[in-house]
Structure formats: C-alpha cells, structure tokens
Amino acid sequence: MSIKEYRTVTQARGGLLIVKDTPGVAFGDRVRIEDYSGGIRNGQVIRAADDAVLVLVFEGTDDLDLEQTWVRFLDEPVEIALSPELLGREFNGLGEPRDGRPPILSNLRRPVAGSAINPAARTYPREFIQTGISTIDGLNSLVRGQKLPIFSGSGLPHNRLAAQIVRQAKLKDEDTSFSVVFAAMGVSYADAKFFRDEFASSGVLRNVVMFINLADDPPVERLTLPRTALTAAEYLAYDLDRHVLVVMTDMTYYAEALREVATAKGDVPARKGYPGYLYSDLAEIYERCGRIHQRHGSITMMPVVSMPSDDITHPIPDLTGYITEGQIVLSRELHNQGIYPPVHISPSLSRLMKDGIGKDDTREDHPRVSAQIYALYARAQETRNLASIIGADELSERDRRYLAFADAFDTRFVGQGESEDRSIEATLNLAWELMSSFPRDMLTRVKETDLAKYYTGTD
Amino acid sequence: MTEPSRTGAIRDINGPIVTVDLPGARSGEQVKIGELGLFGEVISLAGTTAVVQTYESTDGVRPGEIAVGLGFPLSVELGPGLMGGIFDGVQRPLEKIALQSGDYIRRGISVPALDRARQWEFEPNEALEPGAKVSGGLVLGRVQETLTVTHRILVPPGIAGELEELAPAGDYDIEASIARVRTAKGHILKLSMYHRWPVRRPRPYLRRDDGISPLITGQRVIDTFFPQLKGGKAAVPGPFGAGKTVVQQQIARWSNADIVIYVGCGERGNELVDVLESFPQLDDPYSGRKLMERTLLVANTSNMPVVAREASIYVGVTMAEYYRDMGYDVVMLADSTSRWAEALREVSGRLGQMPVEEGYPAYLASRLAAVYERAGRVETYGAGSGSVTLIGAVSPPGGDFSEPVTSHTKDIIETFWALSKELADARHYPSIDWVTSFSGHVHTAAQWWHKEVDPNWERRRTAALALLARDAELSRIVNLVGPEALSDAQRWELEGASLIKEGVLQQSALDDVDTFCSPQKQFALLDIAITIYSSGAELIAIGVPVSELQNLPILAKMRRIKSMYTSDQMNQIQAFRGEVNSAMGEIRIEYAKQGEPAVS
C-alpha cells in the first residue's frame, strides 16, 4: 500500500481543512497531517468528493499554513488498540497515552465509530445495582446496562456524587466490583485531578481506564473521545466479560465542540445553534451501553450533563433525556441548604427501575414505597408553596404533617454522608419510618399487607 | 415490472447523502452504493447526477466507486411470516441478521423480510372456481400465520383477470405459485403468497368509511375521557419522562385491535427489547393467546442510521394497510414522529435546503399530514371492512407544545393525549392532562358506550370533567389564600375531584390487577366516584359538615378499589356501591333525625 502525501490544502479554518485533487479518498478515513514545523496532527475525512475532501483536524487548525502542510490519507478508519493493559492507564481522545508511558501494543484494533447493536441481540437490563445512595436506590434505581445521566449545574457536587457511585456501586448480594471507564471532555485540570485522586485513594485505580481531554486541549478531539472510551468499554465488557461503569463528564462540553465544528462546516442550525443531528449524534454515544444476549459483561453509563443556566429544557439535557433511561437531577436549592447529595427527586426518574426491583430483586414493597414517597412528596411540595404564601401557622393539621414530612425527607432521606453506603434495606426502612408519620388511611399507594409488615406509626 | 439495472459512479460522499453520476435514474429509485453494496434511495435529480440518501453509514466509501440503479422504489414484502417479527427501518429481519452478522449490524447485509424456506398450510377460498373474475384485494385463500392471526392471501392490487387455476389445500412456501390468472390481454400471471408494494404509495381500497366503534385500550383516561375510534388518528405529545412510551406500550398491550404494529422510530433500544421480551409472555385479554402473535415490530433505534428512520414510518404503515386489506383492525404506534421529522430535517439540512421553522424544511407539515392520512376505516376490495388507527408519539423539545412538529400534528389528528410533566413528577400516571387533551370522537364513542355499557356514560363523563375543571379553579384560590377560605361545599368539590383523579384517572401500568380495565369496570369506578361526590354534596346541603364526610372510610376505599378487584370481579365492585349507599344513607338518617341543620 503506497501512501501518497498531498500538499494541496486550499482552505484551513475552524478545525477543518479542504484538500484538493485527492482521487479516491474514503469517507471517514484517518488522516495524518504534518505542519511546517514537522509537528504531526490527526484528522478524519468528513466529506469526500472526487476532486476534494474535507478533513476534520482533531488538534485544530491553529498555526497551520497552506503551503507547508502535508496531508496523508492513511486508508484506515480512526481506530484504537485494545488489550487488558488498558486498565490503570490514561489516554487522550485518540487513545494516545497521556501518562508518559508507552502506547498500547496490540494486534487488536477496532474502529472507534462502532456500529449499532442489533436490537434483537439485546437483553433487557434488570439487575439492580446498589449505589448506597437512598434517592437513587430507593426511588430511581439503577440497573446493569442502563444509561442514567446526572443533570447538574455549575458549582453543584456532581463530581463528588459520581465518584461516590463509582466507589460504592455493587450488585446486591454480590461483591463483584465494576471496571470503570472514565471519559472527561473539556473538564478543568482540578476536576480531572479530583477523579484521579479519588480513584487512587479508593484503591480502584488499577480497574480504571481514563480518557481525558482538558478544557485547554483542542475541542475537536472531544468529538472522538467518548467514542474511543466506549470502544474500550465494549472491549472490557464483551471481550473480557467485565461489568463496566462508564462515567462521562461533561457531555455539555462535548455538544459545544460539536456545535463549533458544525458551524465551521456551515451546517444548518436547529436549536440554539446546535446542528439538527445533535440527537442522532448523542444517541450514537449513549446507545452503546446495554446488555447483549450471551455476553457476560455489561456497560452501564453515567454521563454528567451540566445544564446551562440550570435550564433542563436546554437542547443538551433535553435531547439527552429523550435518549437515556431516566435522569438524576441535582437541585441548587437543596445544595444551598447544605444537603448532600442534592438530588431533586421530582424531576428525577429511572425508566428501567420497574424490572430491577421488587420481591426477587430488592424487597417486595419497594415499587409501592417508591410510588407512595413520590405522591407524598409532591403533595408536600404544594404545601410548602402554600405555606410560603399564607404562613405555616395558617395551615391545617394535615398540611403541617406534610410540611414536617418534607423537611425530614430532605434532611434524612435525601441527605447522607459522602462515605455513607446505605443498603437497600436501610433505605426502604428509612422510607417507612418517614411515611409512618402519616395515618394508615393516607398511605393509599401501598398495600394493606405492606402496612401490616412495615408500618411503624401509632395509628 | 423490474427494469434492468443501470450503473454509474459515485461523485461525492457527505455522510448519508451521496451524489452519484447515474443517467436515467428515477426519483425514489433504489440505488446500491459502492463496493459494500449499501442501499439508498434517489431523492433529487439534476442532469445526469442523482442525490441518494443511504440507509447505512457510508464510512469507507470512496468517490469513483460503482453505483447501481435498481429500477424500483423502496418496497416491502407482504405475505405470511411478518407477525411476531422484528424488522429494521427498511424491513430487514433483525433476528435473522443477528444470526448472520452477530450482535452488531454489519453494513451491506441483505436478507429478505420473509422466510423463503418456511412452508405454510394454504387453504383455498372455496367460493372461487376456475373462470371466476378476480381483481386486486380479492381473497384467494388463507394461511394460519400465528394461532391468533389468520392471514388472508390477497390478489395484489392492480391485477385483474380470470382465474385459471387455484392451488389445492396443502403446504407451500411463499414463492410457490398458488394461483394463475389470465389478464384481459391474455397474459398468464402466476401469483404466489406474497407480493411487494412501494412504501410511499398508499394501498388502494374501495371507499373510505367513518369510524364507528371506539378502540378500547383498557386505559380509563383514554377510553372514558378521551376516546379514540378504530381508524382514527391520535398523537401523544410529552416531554421526556412524562410516560409516552408507557402509554404507547399499554395501548399495544391491551387495545382490542386485531393487529398491532409498533414502530420504534429513533427511540431507545432497551424499550424495544422490553416489548420483545415481555409480549411473548403476556396474554391478550381478548383472544387469550400471547400478545406477540398479533404484534409486529419495526425498529430503528436512535443509534441506527437516520435515513432508515425516515423510511421506517412508511414501512410500518404499509404493513398496517396490508393487514387492513385483509379486513382487520390494525393499530400502528409510531414512537416517535419527532425523530422521523428530525430525520427529514437532517437530510434537508445536508441538501442545503432553505429551513423554515427551527431548521425544519418547508414540506414538514405536508409530509406529516400525508402519513397520518393513511389511517382510516375503509371498505376493502375483498375482505369487508378494515381499519388502520395511527397513534404517533411526539417528543417536543423542552416540552414546548408550540414547536413545529407538535403544532402541525395537532392540526391533523383528532385525538390529542397531552402528557404533563407536572403530573408525571407527582407520579400521577398515565400523566394525560385532562385540561389540554381533547378527543373529537366523544359523540360517536358515546353511542357505543350507551349501547354496550351504560346509557349514563356521557352524563357521568361530563360531570367528572366539570368537577375537574372546578378543581382547577378552586385550587388557584387555595394557592392564594389557603383552604380555610373555602366553604364546605367547595371543599367537598376538591375532595370529589381528588377521588376522580386518584380513584379513576390514575392507573398504574405495573399493577397487575389494574393495568387493564374493562369498559364495565371503567364505568363502575367513574359512576361510584360521581355517586359519592353527588350524594355527599346533597348531605352538605342539608348541613352535614365536610369533615364528617372526609373521615368516611369509603373515600380511602374508593382510591384503592381499582387495585383490589380485576375486571372479572365486577360483583365485588358493585358490592362497594352498596357500601357507599349505606354509608351515605346512615348519615342522612342521622341528620334527618336531628331534624336541624348541624353547625359546620
């Protein structure tokens, strides 16, 4: 295979190069670019015509000239080398080492683009994961193979929560721990260091693969980073039979990088300048998690999405919510009250909860306890609004009961220590303790048999 | 029918949009792209170049590679073997693809939708003798496709002539000739048990009829409050997390349709797997057989190629029309039409077409309308009356119902089940909002309910909605000044509305007892709730304090009774009516005895 070099770059802008007179270059192929100083950059063909190609340069097009730029089309897709040695290592978005150690040597290379899992080959996820966090386990349970994002805002403790989940996540009655793939896009040095230190201090580091692109690294690289990370996750899950937890932070920066490139390409914008294909693009990433027939491993995903201006209807959290199987929403109000983790349960949801909980998985009363807590809390929130208008003194006795419940719920059920690992039984018992401040008659979402067994009130 | 194929060369690859040099190409024609043999469809022509949208990723395709025009438009295979299957957006059987290409879908793979090897037991139509005049839509015979579904083998539309020969009863594969027809021009046509039909062309029928009977879904808020007719068009819009998918799955499970086609269009893979894994276990409440035997899935999950997503809706509705032509009532669920519209937008964006609203092309509204218009109840050519009910989920960005897809859809459909984030947050499911939802079929549905269930249906329904409207009004006052400001009668109205909400409207899909509710049980629950309210209102009028009524144990039981007894235990539910009457009667007697109004 002879590889020709082209010096026919006619345009360079916004991370894109146009190269002329390039017959027969394949769409999606990897490109190697040498600049005037001998520096090497990587790229990918994102449009191929018979007389010219458009190349996306991962390291950006800053400091390139048109004269002395040599372009080589490598005749292979963007790939990553895979071996068990990945664990404990740190890479950039292209799978190149960031930890100063040598690159992974392996005959096994896979294209990072991946392909779609055949829906007929999937298995429905139903194994409960205990995270030790009451608002998740009790009310928004996570199961193996689920994608459950954390919707957060700037300054909220999403990183601490993600780290706590990584530390504590386990299957009920099982000790198998998860392998972790950590994908950081556009995060600050401090955030990256926080996770690195967390993994090191909790002793999981040799079970973690990190893919990191910092806030000051080229944004275009963020477009391949989650794909590279997920290709590694698929290898760990389906080749090495591991249960993999993928933590991706922050998807908002990913989407912003996508917008940057889309704008440079001249794509028609849909909402807030994001391209119309943002949904499909995010889905290509999120839908790579799941369970597959007859494979032992699984990929569970916890992306962090920071909501610009805490707006849940912003295109990024909005489209994410349409793809993922629920969301854990953090609240600034709870955070300001000093409650950790500040999980706002009303907009939080786990779609796959129904099949992972109950008699054979957690406890028989679990689904109804969850429904009852939600109903009480919704009513309690209305009462809070009312109290803020007419004053708590004006409330009826019944309403004051709701108010007391809401306060106890926020501080005791939602709030818990950063190293407090609650078992699912402890979470459910706590829920019953709080529910028992109401008379039996008001608990209409649970069964009589549940009341007989777990109700601790005096009524 | 098929013209010989023509070849050309690829000029430009821009994601799924490929420009080819292909003289003589026809708009809509299928094209095989490159050495991988990816399938695509011509969407525009200029001179000798054609723009092709491809159903698969074009990674690795090069300019200069071959492009082959196949001479026919995107078509589906229609014949026995569809039921119970799962197909992708261009009708490739996903289970067979998994056998060939493993857990991931390999590109360029081509597997016919229908199994060529399988033998079907064909029973000819006794009424047909050689020499009989036959034409498109006529029933030639039948095949037991699944234990629930009898597949009627039809003369393909557009064929007419004299029957020369009809095969005797026996086992045949779908390619075997089961009939010979001599056309007016004297040609002999061999008919097999399947034929192909272009998906973008609606299948013909004799005439259109009005819908007459409601589609019973076993969901109270739908059947009782916002009914849908067989052959109607409905939309389920809702922000994420409001429960669109559960509503659609409940309809797929429990509706009294003969056939259910579920099109997962740009949605989650795991949701389709849920259907795939649970439907073979679930019993159809009408036939008693497994639900999967009457269900067909079309799956283009959100990570599958976007152009096939655009095609998937047409593929689904064409199969729905095919079963309609056999005289069946078919329900097609499209989850979600917003993803379909986004696929249109993505292709139009790549073509550089001028966007109008939020990047959508100008033809969005007309395309949407054309798809929904394929729903309807019709008189078929040879199998009596059949219908296609089309129910589309809409996923408005940010839950904003004024965005283009929701607002255009709202103009076209007749029934609108608007899902509310607030209700979902309070875990009030199904979160169909009674204020913004509407149904244009209440009057027609009432005729059915009055005849089949109870002549008071429409009155009770109106009373319940009026109570809910009062509740919204009074709640605004409560939010301003607190509940103490209300009179006893007004507080009883709030209690009554709450009984309707919790005792009737709320219905958990996860509750084995209540997940399906027969029309009789639906009416009984509604009737008892209204009875409690109205007899309570009478008592308050004679001076009974509202607090005494609020402490009645029948209120808690009213909220729970839906989950205590199934639709088969109507006696127990009717017995509760007796409890209600005697509890209310006791208070009435007590206060009549005192002979004076009590102080409230």
Image (tube, helix red, strand yellow):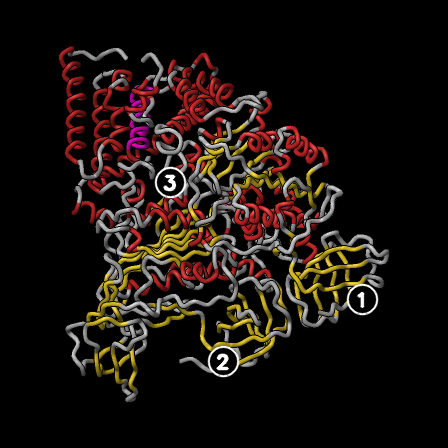
Q: Is residue B494 magenta?
A: yes
The disc numbered 3 marks a residue on which chain?
Answer: B
Q: Is residue A408 magenta?
A: no
Tell me whether marks 3 and 1 sit on the same chain.
Answer: no
Residue B432's label in the rendered image is: 3
Q: Position of residue A144 (x, y in %)?
A: 48, 40
SS assignment at label 3: loop
Q: CA distance from mark 2 to mark 3?
A: 51 Å
Q: In the displayed structure, does residue B363 sit left or right of residue A399?
A: right
Residue A63's label in the rendered image is: none
The front one of A424 and B504 is A424
Q: Position of residue B117 (x, y in %)?
A: 33, 69
Q: Image quadrant for the N terminus of chain B?
A: bottom left
The disc numbered 1 marks a residue on which chain?
Answer: A
Amino acid type at circle 3 is Ile
- Residue under numbered circle 2: B5
Q: In the displayed structure, does residue A132 sit left or right of residue B247?
A: right
Q: Residue at x 31, y 40 (%)?
A: B221
- Residue under numbered circle 1: A7
Main SS category, magenta section: helix
Q: Residue at x 66, y 63 (%)?
A: A47
Q: Position of residue A308 (x, y in %)?
A: 62, 38
- Magenta stretch, residue numbers: B487-503
Q: Nearer the viewer, mark 2 or mark 3?
A: 2
Occupied quadrant, residue B262: bottom left
Contact (Cβ within 8 Å) of mark 1 with mark 2: no
Q: How many marks?
A: 3
Visible in this render: residue B479? no
Q: Image quadrant for the C terminus of chain B?
A: top left
SS assignment at label 1: loop
